[in-house]
Image (cartoon, rainbow, N blue to C red):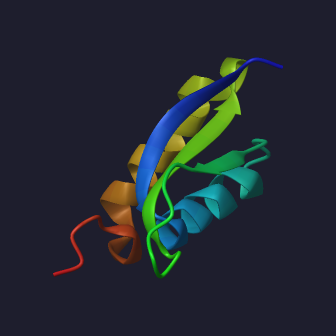
Amino acid sequence: IMWKVIYIAKDILLARNLEKILKENGIATILNQLEVEKDELNGNVEILVPKYETQEAVDLISQALIYDDNLREDDN
């Protein structure tokens, strides 16, 4: 399988939430933490999916980020 990075989450919690949404829709997902900060929860996390599912996965993530207040990037 060719894997493609479709999103870089700002922390592991956001990445896991998005991974859950993708898996619920039958899309295989790999999380790849790029750098681990001291507390391990922060630090960018790549979300990868099989290349042939890129468009569906991007659509699902876009929708989730727009409509789910819990997933908002700005936690202020």
Q: Position of residue 58 (x, y in %)?
A: 49, 35
Q: Position of residue 52 (x, y in %)?
A: 70, 18
Q: Position of residue 75 (x, y in %)?
A: 24, 78
Tell me how many marks there are.
0
**Residue most toward the left?**
76
Q: Is residue 73 left or right of residue 43?
A: left
Would you place residue 33 above or below residue 54 in this image?
below
Give 56 or 9, whichever is nearer the viewer: 9
Image quarter (top left, top right, bottom left or bottom right) of the N terminus: top right
Would you place residue 1 above or below residue 68 in this image?
above
**Residue displayed at 52% across by 73% down:** 13
The answer to which image quadrant residue 19 occupies is: bottom right
Would you place residue 61 above or below residue 36 in this image?
above
Q: Is residue 67 left or right of residue 6?
A: left
**Residue most toward the right?**
1
The answer to which image quadrant residue 18 occupies is: bottom right
Q: Is residue 40 left or right of residue 44?
A: right
**Residue displayed at 33% across by 74% down:** 69
**Residue displayed at 46% across by 41% down:** 7
The answer to which image quadrant residue 29 occupies is: top right
Q: Is residue 42 left or right of residue 74?
A: right
**Residue displayed at 57% across by 67% down:** 17
Image quarter (top left, top right, bottom left or bottom right) of the C terminus: bottom left
Q: Position of residue 6 (x, y in %)?
A: 51, 34
Give 35 or 47, whichever is nearer the viewer: 35
Would you place residue 59 above or below residue 43 in this image?
above
**Residue most toward the front?**
38
